[in-house]
Image (cartoon, coloured by chain):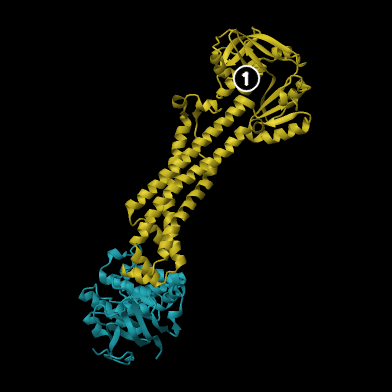
Amino acid sequence: MNTVIDAHNISKVYNPETIPVYAVNNVHLHLQKGEFTALVGPSGSGKTTLLNLIGGLDKPDEGKIEINGTDITRLSSNQLINFRLHNIGFVFQSFNLVPVLTAKENVEFIMQLQGIPKKEREARLKNLFRQIRLEDKVDCRPAELSGGQQQRVAVARALASKPQFVLADEPTANLDSKSASNLLDIMAELNKEENMTFIFSTHDQRVIERARRVVTLVDGRITTDTALVDVSHSVASVSSPPLIT
Amino acid sequence: MILIMAWRNIWRNKARSLIILSSVMIGLFTGIFVLALYRGMIDGRIRVVIEDEVSHLQLHHPEFKKDYEARYVIGNSEELIKSVSGLRQVSAMAPRDIAQGMLSTGTGSNGVEIRGVIPEKEVAVSRLDKKIIEGNYFSSEKRNELLIGKKLFDKMKLKLHNKVVLTFSDKDNNVTSGAFRIAGVFRSANTALDERIVFVRSGELAGLLNIAGSYHELAILLYRNEDVAGVQQLLRAKYAGLSVENWKEISPETELTISTMNQFSLIIIAIIMLALAFGIVNTMLMAILERTHETGMMVALGMNKLRLFTLVLSETIFLTLAGTPAGLLLAWGTTLYISKHGIDTASYAGEVMGSFGYSSVIYPEFPADQLIAVMGIVAATAILSAIFPAVKALRLQPVEALRK
């Protein structure tokens, strides 16, 4: 299997000069292509910070992160923007669709940034909206969609650039049970059919139950890293020793 | 897509955008209307210079205008007049005799320029008969009639039919004088000239100057302003021994005023737009700050700095340009309406305009040829206004912006 994410010994410290707070502390994490991984832990455990570091939105103070062999900690901010565009899909807790664009335009926007020709964009859009089951909502603005529908569009947007993996920060936090279930079905289906790698932070037990690997963070350290079911699609590896307090 | 986003973004806060659009509209209207007023004043001044004062072209003996000595006359005047009359571009022509002298009455005297004119020819060139406000134009029956400007008439406390004495030097530099009776009082658009010039018949003045049958000046009025350079070139080539000047050369201060006013009026628009730029910057800054989270998200997804800058720049340009058509339309409509009736400044500014040689009634003219310059100023305003908000947006760190 191919390694998609290879994070070595990464740490992120806030207030290093005064009272250092380790948001992420000496974390090792390896993700293979096609994994469906949940990052769990209490609030303040460093889940979002770890996702930001892996997603190239923030830089670690120590360690290095390789995405498909590229050390993203060495990239400039401009290079990082371009790297994110072509390699990483993002799904945010609060959907974060551009309110002035329609559902279709929100998804197409990313492909336009990538410079994909119109014909190919159209074909991909058709397929993506079929996959998220929102073919009849393509021309709706985000305000005209429910939370669940918006998050499905956000998933389509994340996949539009054909990324190496999708990072989802608490994707079901603002959804009702039915919408959350629908979203998880779609994500699981994409993972299975297209071998798309997903890593999401969550508190949601329903998400944890659907994950095939669960990494638990406490105080910025990985305490457990468990493959739950069906390891044919993922390889579980404990990369950081459990923190024993 | 960035342009679509930019256009839709400006309508997210309609009230705020409409205020800026209205400001741009009013600012542009004000600027263009000021420009139209200046243009109207300039055109009025050009009309006064050409139709009332100097005509399109003047011919003199090359030495005449140095000291206005009577001996420097145009040779072969009659033949010259005949030849110039034959030019198809020439509308009218008036020969004149000119003397610098003194106008005296029983109670006082004043320095004047005495213009000896052929009444029927002068009418065609300077419409002198139309400017008579008291008394009459030259009549065919009476001799030694004089037309005097209203300002000098009042200053010297004269009355119609009063006798005045004109004293000046003749061809041989002998002091000579003649008595004339005031037949009429004229008022031109240029009150300064009204205080300095008197008109008598050419034959009577030429007799006193001892240059009978000769003229000092030939004023030529053309059908079109555009023909001035061509006719001037033609006459210069044909009459190398004469001085052939166009109205800009005769009245260089008018030419200077025109060029200065053009620049000045564009500066006024630039100042108005600069003031507007602060409002636009403020609006765009508010918009950027309100959308910090959204901007961070777009950068996170892969929108690079150039595209982000383009987005902010496009929004600012749309915001600025959206008010432009309305401003132009308002300025055009207002100018068109007022140009038919004119603005009479005499009611509140008295003779101020006239004392500078400008007509007191201003007919604003839409400055169509300066619209490109105006649009350039508007575009520059938009670009300048975009820079600060764009820099603010570019400095956003996605991870921090997403937390907000």
Give percent across and percent down for residue A154: 33, 72
Left or right of A20 in this view: B378 = right
Give percent across and percent down for residue B52: 60, 24
Q: Quadrant of the C terminus of chain A?
A: bottom left
Identify whether B142 is placed above or below B335: above
**The residue tagged with tag 1: helix, strand or loop?**
helix
Pointer 1 chain: B
At label 1, the amino acid type is: Val
Q: Quadrant of residue B27?
A: top left
Q: Which residue is mark 1?
A: B123
Identify whether B95 is placed above or below B165: below
Give percent across and percent down for residue A232: 32, 92
Picture residue at 35% right of the left edge, 55% below the top:
B11
* Chain in yellow in the render: B
Asked if residue A212 shows in the view, the reply is no
Q: Quadrant of the N terminus of chain A?
A: bottom left
Q: Quadrant of residue A195?
A: bottom left
* Chain in cyan in the render: A
Q: Residue furthest front?
A: A18
Near-viewer residue (B301 or B388): B388
Left or right of A122 in this view: B137 = right
Asked if residue A50 shows in the view, the reply is yes
Q: Quadrant of residue A209?
A: bottom left
Identify whether B139 is placed above or below B313: above
Picture residue at 79% right of the left edge, 29% below the top:
B241
Give the crowd class for mark 1: few <14, some 14-19, many >=20 residues within 10 Å: some
Near-viewer residue (A99 or B189): B189
Near-viewer residue (B20 or B84): B20
Give percent across and percent down for residue A47: 29, 80
